Image (cartoon, rainbow, N blue to C red):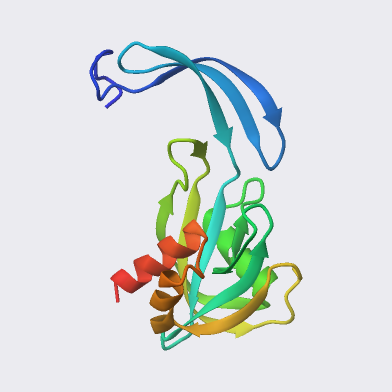
Amino acid sequence: MDDIAAGHPGAPWRMANVRPVIESPWLGLQLADVTKPSGAVEEHYLVRLPEAVMVVVLDAPGEHVLLAWRHRCVPDLWSYELPGGLLEDGEEPADAARREVAEETGCTVRELRHLVTFEPAVGSVASPHHVFLARGVDRIGEPTERDEGIFEWIPLARTRQLIAERQLGNSGTLIGLLHVLAHR
């Protein structure tokens, strides 16, 4: 698609003069001159967040999903979430998924499969989110991360109601659970 001629509505947006505004492990913010397919040029902010993983952990029969009830301070939101977190430098998404489940729940997963990778705010932010499905867990000890909420096994059939009641507010959690529900 990159070879579509400038001026065509399907041509790519082009960036030039990219300059840093904020650089931290949590947030990269840059300002760039962007040329749209129409030829119009404007300044545009580029927001880059770290890659993340989330894991739909099902019990062995596949009837319950492991979710954390937790508060998120930025949107001031209480909701259920899947275990997950940010990738460490050089870490593969599947390894991060296994690590996050162990740190947050004190369990290892028996079986892990990649479901989907998505961008949570594709028009504004670059931050690949990798969603995995895990089936079955084995307890290895206490969670090492204490601030991740209260985990409980929720009947998978109840997740539709939780979505309708807006008790699932995290995009990765919604995408992971909707994917699993759609392919049952």
Please provide percent x and percent y for residue 22.
70, 29
> Which quarter shows the C terminus?
bottom left
At a point 69% along the width and 69% down the height, the residue shown is 103
At a point 64% along the width and 33% down the height, the residue shown is 28
> Which quarter shows the N terminus?
top left
Please provide percent x and percent y for residue 138.
60, 84
Residue 16 is at least partly visible in this image: yes
Please provide percent x and percent y for residue 167.
51, 70
Quarter residue 98 falls in = bottom right
Q: Is residue 180 left or right of residue 66?
A: left
In the displayed structure, 42 sits above or below 12; it is above
Closest to the observer, 125 or 57? 125
Q: Is residue 31 left or right of residue 35?
A: right
In the displayed structure, 129 sits above or below 22; it is below
Q: Is residue 146 left or right of residue 4?
A: right
At a point 41% along the width and 77% down the height, the residue shown is 161
